Image (spheres, rainbow, N blue to C red):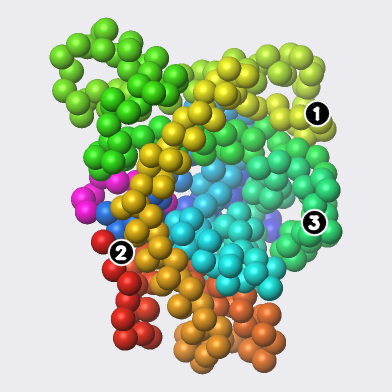
Amino acid sequence: MHEEREDRLRSPFQRDRDRIVHCTAFRRLKHKTQVFIRPEGDHFRTRLTHSLEVAQVARSIARPLGLDEDLTEAIALAHDLGHTPFGHAGERALSAALGEYGGFDHNLQSLRVVTRLERRYARYDGLNLSRASLEGLVKHNGPLKGKMSALSPVVVELNEALDLDLENYAGAEAQIAAISDDIAYDAHDIDDGLRSGLLHLEDLVEVPLTARIIGELKQAFPTLERSRFAAELTRRLITVMITDVLVETARRLEETGAASACAVTHAGKPTVGFSENLAREEKELKGFLFSRLYRHESVMRAAHAGEAIVTDLFNRLQSEPELLPEVWQAQVDMADERRRARRAADYIAGMSDGFAVAEHRRLFDHTPDLG
């Protein structure tokens, strides 16, 4: 978006990755929910550790395919920068609160973070990432064909400046980042679920994908302690999924004959993906996790409390913008209701779980219990 001289020591994509790692929003992910809100213990995933794990999986796929690892890693590390406190519970609350103001989506919020909300550089707002990284963030979940009339203003602005080819697929690196997100949270949510006691190894025998691995492990290590067994299950599940993606992506490349980045984006279908069999099994695994873990009573109880906190904060800060820090009141016409609402949402979305609780306690007499 803003011209800069080339870095003599780093490629544009290495520079993108470094700017993402050093930005404030990335550090805040350390204290934002992945699945468990304010868990006891130090071993559960946060949004930061999840992002690092996605990047590791993504590089493991990009390297054998001869793709740009730095671009892949940059997109993977940035994909959750816009996540709210309390994970998807916070996102649901902001989406409902902003219903008449264009809604809220954490993917679009990630774009707002890297193009507008980070204030680190003398000549511009945002991180001034490369076109390829921005295109990957916009389209990593697929093209926006048929959605052009409903585009977010931040996407419209980017597209006008950089021509993001919105009706076609993202490049292979962005597609890898997207599927690596699925691989990471499938495997690591199982690990956290087992650690929390909300899932049991016996439950996972119901799912074909994990049942197969569990059977192999029981045969090879019949007396292995449960903690090592769970870790080995997670490791092998990641390996199975990565291997499947590599084989299937190679097959699709051969089938389409795509031999360039442009050919991949104009292939008319995803180039990176699971095989038909593994895609079906992975969908079954997601359904299992949704019903047994994400909708577990204890997880939902904390999620409802998180939603209530975010809703209260939005209603208060949107109606009384003078409660926002001075820097957040500046440069926005607070008389404009839509802009005032978006400003409050931007401020809340950037909060860590702990800061959101502290702000709620400052502004309200009673704060819902997350325990």
Residue 143 image-quadrant placement = top right
Q: Mark 1: which secondary structure?
A: loop
Q: Which mark is residue 370?
A: 2
Q: Which mark is residue 229?
A: none
Residue of label 1 = 267
**Residue 242 x/y as whole percent:** 50, 23
Q: Height in image: 53 above or below 238?
A: below
Q: Main secondary structure of the magenta part?
A: loop
Q: Mark 3: which secondary structure?
A: helix
Going by the numbered disc 2, the residue's amino acid type is Leu
The foreground one among 86 and 287 is 287
Residue of label 3 = 159
Going by the numbered disc 1, the residue's amino acid type is Ala
What is the magenta range?
40-49
Q: Height in image: 255 above or below 142?
A: above
Q: Nearer the viewer, mark 3 or mark 2?
A: 2
Residue 272 image-quadrant placement = top right
The quadrant the N terminus occupies is bottom right
Closer to the chain start, of discs 3 and 2, is 3
The reply to whether residue 30 is in sight is no
Q: Mark 2: which secondary structure?
A: loop
Residues packed near mark 2 inside 10 Å, few (<14), some (14 to 19) or many (20 plus)? some
**Residue 71 x/y as whole percent:** 60, 40
Indicate yes or no whether the magenta region holds residue 45. yes
Indicate yes or no whether the magenta region holds residue 277. no
Q: CA distance from mark 3 to mark 1?
A: 21 Å
